[in-house]
Image (cartoon, rainbow, N blue to C red):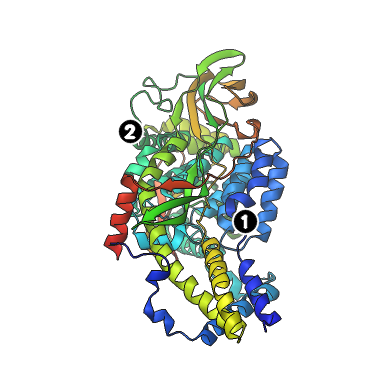
Amino acid sequence: MISMERLFLVFCLICTSCANYAERLEPTHASYYSGQLNLAEASLRDLIEDADRDDQPLLKLELASVLQARGNYAGAAALLIASDSWFEVLDYTNSSVDDIAGFAFSVEGVYRVSPPERVMINTQNMINHLAMKDTEGAAVEARRLSALLDRDDIADDELFANSLAWGLAGLAMEANGRVGEAGDFYNQLGAGHPLAPPAAGTEPGMGTIVVVGQLGRAPRRREASFLVRIDGCSQQLNLPVLQERIGGPTGARVSVDGVDRGPVPEVFDLGHHLLQRYDDEFPRLLAAAMAQAVTRSAISEIAGNALAKSVTDDEDDSEALEGFLGCLIQLIFANSLTADVRCWSLLPGRYHAKRLSVAAGSHIVKFVPTGGGVAQSFPVSVGAGEIVLVNLVSGPGEGYRYQPPPRVRRLYSGPELRLARDLVVFRL
Amino acid sequence: MLPMIGSGCRPKAFDSIPSREIMLMLRFLLASLVIITVIGCDPTFQRGTDDSSIDQAAMSTRLDRVDLEKALDDWYGQFGSSKFLDQSGDGSKTLAVLRIDNDTSEHISSALTTLISSVETRIVNDGDFRVVTNDQIAKNAIAAEMQRIDEVDQSTMADLGMQLGVQYFISGRVGDSAEKTADARRVQYFLFLRVTEVQTGRVMFQSQIDITKQISS
């Protein structure tokens, strides 16, 4: 006879699987990209209130993005200042298979940011402080960016890949009157970089307006199933993948007081950078998933066997149940060990920026995204020798369209699989 | 060769685990989940007047009230026993506290503003100098002039001092040395405050205050 208590236990086990981070954030994305920023903020605040402590820091990064898009730079800055010390960094491109297995396939524990996300905390906060004309706060963020160079968990190449960050750091120091420190940052920029100061310096009676356009959307992590053949057996593995997101302007132009000042050049393609990194991450993620699958399969089989025997004492019932529960528990384990798809999902895909010299006084800066998005005008007051930043986030005007997670993919051969197999064999 | 995943690769060690123990483990896990859900946690609010220890605890590597009080006490201890105060602090001279530049990697500007106000308060209450606080524009102009480092135009400074009506001003900067290990972050602050004579640009008094904060896990 099967007891109700034991069936309830089985039911509870089934219920452990729930919506992942990307799915929980979908209503926020719908509001954000539809331009309903108040709803996006409200839904994020609800999520933060309901979330466990592990998810709150990451959700607050998302909230900082929404607040910045709403022009609440002080609110966004406060969140990012606090978040500077919240996160540890985990780099899937060079971490051990065991470390990746411990974090990439567990949604438990505080999210560990990727190196590009860590750099973006200081980058976004320089934008916040400069937009508020808080040059001292921007300078602090520039020093924090510089301090990342001393850390072992972020490669210097990763830091220098983001020339927007170094350009903003130079601007922050220059705006704060620290010419020498500004020069140190500007030296990291290539020749002719749009944020580099003019060789002749700022003319008397002139100020500087820096326009920053955050266009499109960075790819975000989703869960994808891969069918992998290992020694003749086909296995399904769930991996976090980076999903490219469609939509958004292709470029932007800027005008000041109705006079066209030309296109705003791209200074950092964050989306492309993340996708390039993922090419290096993928074999290690695959290896970690394969290593997890070995353990998972063994445990679920044993548990299924044991549960079947305990649910009923009848010999025939036990045999009948064993197969069914074994499969059921295997399914539950497979679902509960889902890929960690947490990431800072409201970051833009590309950053465009331009430095404009203008006469001191009041101006109207018009930012016109090309190929999608909505033009926006900003009244700007700039003093002689002053640097003022104008920030446009095109996301809220780009429109929302649901993108389903990627389908199951077959991965029966290829260099990634060979590298992953080598990594697993090396680990064993 | 990779291990096979499936019925053929079941480790023998697992066969020895009795089913009753597995059931007990599963029950324990379920019970723990229920207890954690039911108990929950409400925030607790406290007043510093009810429990003075809450003011003492360091919550971050930024500067808090205890740090600012220490900085003020240290500074005034040195300033109070200085020759400058002895010779010039007769209550007839005018002085302005300009600003303390934040050269650190910490967002402590509001704490530094508080420190400036505390320094002003202490000097006003002691009556050694007449403190000018009402012309922020002239103060900013002097501060901007000072920031030119090697190119400070002393005649401009003197003019600005006349405009502000001060003979001395106090200014400062705070720098830091921040280091991080796997489980700790330490910030050492170095606060420098000096008194400058507006007319001549001479530094009449300078002091250094060191504060260290650490956060560890």
In the displayed structure image, the side of residue A276 where residue A401 appears, left or right:
right
Query: In screen coordinates, is B16 left or right of A348?
Result: left
Q: Quadrant of the N terminus of chain A?
A: bottom right
Q: Position of residue B151 (x, y in %)?
A: 37, 32
Examine the image and state in which quarter residue B201 appears.
top left
Tag 2: Cα neighbours inside 10 Å, few (<14), some, or many (≥20)?
A: few
Q: Secondary structure at mark 2?
A: loop
Report in which chain the residue with disc 1 lies: A
Kindly check if marks 1 and 2 are in contact, taking CB atoms under 8 A apart as contact.
no
Q: Nearer the viewer, mark 1 or mark 2?
A: 1
* Amino acid type, callout 1: Ala
Q: Amino acid at mark 2?
A: Asn
- Residue at horizontal 64%, vertical 34%? A396
Using the rendered image of the protein, determine whether residue B139 is visible from the camera's viewpoint.
yes
Q: CA distance from mark 1 to mark 2?
A: 46 Å
Relative to the observer, which residue lies in front, A423 or B125? A423
- The image quadrant where one finds the C terminus of chain A is bottom left
| Pick the front one: A317 or A5 | A317
Q: Position of residue A104 (x, y in %)?
A: 45, 57
- Residue behind mark 1: A19
Q: Nearer the viewer, residue B167 or A59?
A: A59
Few, some or many residues within 10 Å of mark 1 (<14, 14–19, 20+)? few
On the image, the x and y values in percent for residue A43 come to 70, 49
Any part of residue B27 in sight = no
Residue drawn at point x = 53 percent, y = 19 percent: A358
Q: Could you tell me which chain the residue with mark 2 belongs to?
A: A
In the picture as drawn, the residue positioned furthest to the top comes out as A259
Of the numbered discs 1 and 2, the one sitting upstream in the chain is 1
Q: Secondary structure at mark 1?
A: loop
- At 64% from the left and 76% from the top, the residue drawn is A9
Q: Which residue is mark 2?
A: A187
